[in-house]
Amino acid sequence: MGLWTLLKSGLVLDIYFFKNNRAQLVSMFAWPYILLALMLGMGFLFGSAETFKSNVGVEADPVVFFIASTLVAMASMSVMWEVGGTVLYHRWIGTLPYVLIAPYRTSITLVMSYVPRYLLWSFMQLAEFIPVLVWREGLVGGLTDTLVMGLAIVVGMLPLLGFAAIFSALLLTIKEETNILGWLNPIILILSGAFYPAYLFPAWARLLSMLLPTTYTFELARLSSLLGAPKLAEMTFLIAVLFGMSFLYNALSFTLMGKAESRALRSGAV
Amino acid sequence: MWVKVKAIIWLHTLRLWRYGMSFINMILSQVLWILLFIMGVLLFVPPEHLTIALRMAYWTIAAWSVISSFSSLVGGWTSFFILMGMVEEHLLRNTSPFTTIIGRVLTGTTVSFAIIIAMGYAFSWIFGRVLMTVEKPALMLSAFTFLIVESLSYALSISATSMRTSISEQFLEILNFGIIGLLIVPISALPGYARLVYLAIPYVAPTYMIKVAVGGEVPSLIWEAALISVVESIIMALIALRLIRSVEDHVRRNGVRAVGFW
């Protein structure tokens, strides 16, 4: 079984999932718009775009700002649940032992079979926002924003996969998995500055946010919301940080997952 | 009858106790998700309007929390109940499976009010504003009662339907989430002729009563809202009862179609 087979299995699984579960497909398209509409609706009901710009401290379009935030939030939630939570799913349906004895390491199986889903879902959600981006920024501006957000989705995925695999390793060794994933996801999003920029946090929270790869993905995607062309130097810096974190988190997950697998097998936890 | 009621109360209390970690997790994660959302909204709010914006958002989300908890904890639990083969077990013992499902009102009430209280304390502490003061407690109590009746009726209606045909999970999630947007709209922002139409949307009238009870809305339509709440609660409860009877009758003759939610 090659790596391509793992990727292909993930892709085929998703295509059939969409084919057989239309309601899920509709909900996948509806969720980001509902979230965005609620956030902007409540925001404009209680305040204004001028207050938003003054609070954020930069000249940014609130609509594009929250489109970028919503996209990355949906993507990172999906990674945490789909990679981290897959261990739980396999345990429930009784396939975890097969995943553990497969020719590849569990972390590789979980990550590689998930990559097509991440790319497919994220780019479909990005595509549904293109009309709004073009409406806000014009054709060239809208397409530039789409490219910046697409870049953030792809580059941001690399460290996030390792990060989520570390939680998979944790879930292999502990009980009450859903109870941990349930609150871990919103905490990570809050600390990453999902809807409230991390640079506005107090110092202790800023320090924690600097350790999370999602912080930089949000910042990278939100560069598209700045009025005028996105700054190239800032983009390059954020991409470099994300590459560095990819190396760190993926190396760490590779080591931890091996230990967690051995421990789970030894203790009969699976 | 009393023995059955006692057994159902005992069952749900015991489950609540045994799933203690899930209970705490549910409250914690719900408060965190709402905090995440509120932080984004607050970016738009000027400092002088922060208290009123937070109070309105808090009480609207409190109302939504009841609606959402009842849908997922009463309606959503039906899938588990069907999968465990409990519908047939109850029918064989000449007990309506819905009496057990209705017992989830205990779980729904405990979870939703625990979330409201935890959220109130957490937000008051984080944002340094007092959010939990109520000007008219009796009005607040009656508004929450109407919300519980309406939410429970909706949950039972989709529970009953899910025993005959598959129901999309979106009826538990998306519709509930989308309804926050409807509930948050202040009645004063609408033109006069649209206000009664707006109040007639399920859940809106009791939520308006909650906003009046905390002094966040003008009480000009309070009697109309109370009347609409009573009528809607009765209609929704009757629809749920009718559906339950018809589904029970169908299931006794044809068996359970174990589909549920997906």
Image (spheres, coloured by chain):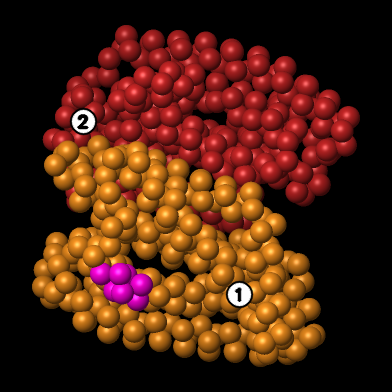
Q: In this view, does A244 lie to the left or right of B223?
A: right
- Within 10 angstroms of label 1, few (less than 14), some, or many (20 or more) residues? some
Q: In this view, does A268 lie to the left or right of B193?
A: right
Secondary structure beneath label 2: helix
Q: Residue placed at 30% from the left, 69% from the top?
A: B137
Task: Compare residues B259 and A92 and report the one nearer the observer.
Answer: A92
Q: Looking at the rendered structure, which numbered label has been put on residue A55?
A: 2
Q: What residue type is labelled 2?
A: Asn
Task: Compare residues B226 and A150 and report the one nearer the observer.
Answer: B226
Label 1 to label 2: alpha-carbon separation: 47 Å
Residue A62: image x %, image y %?
24, 36
Q: Residue placed at 52% from the left, 63% from the top?
A: B110
Comparing marks 1 and 2, which lies closer to the viewer? 1
Rendered red, the chain in question is A
Q: Residue placed at 36% from the left, 56% from the top?
A: B61
Q: Residue placed at 33% from the left, 12% from the top?
A: A234
Q: Point out the stretch of residues depicted in magenta.
A: B136-143
- Which residue lies under the disc numbered 1? B103
Q: Which amino acid does label 1 sit on?
A: Gly
Residue B62 to residue A198: above or below: below
Rendered orange, the chain in question is B
Secondary structure beneath label 1: loop
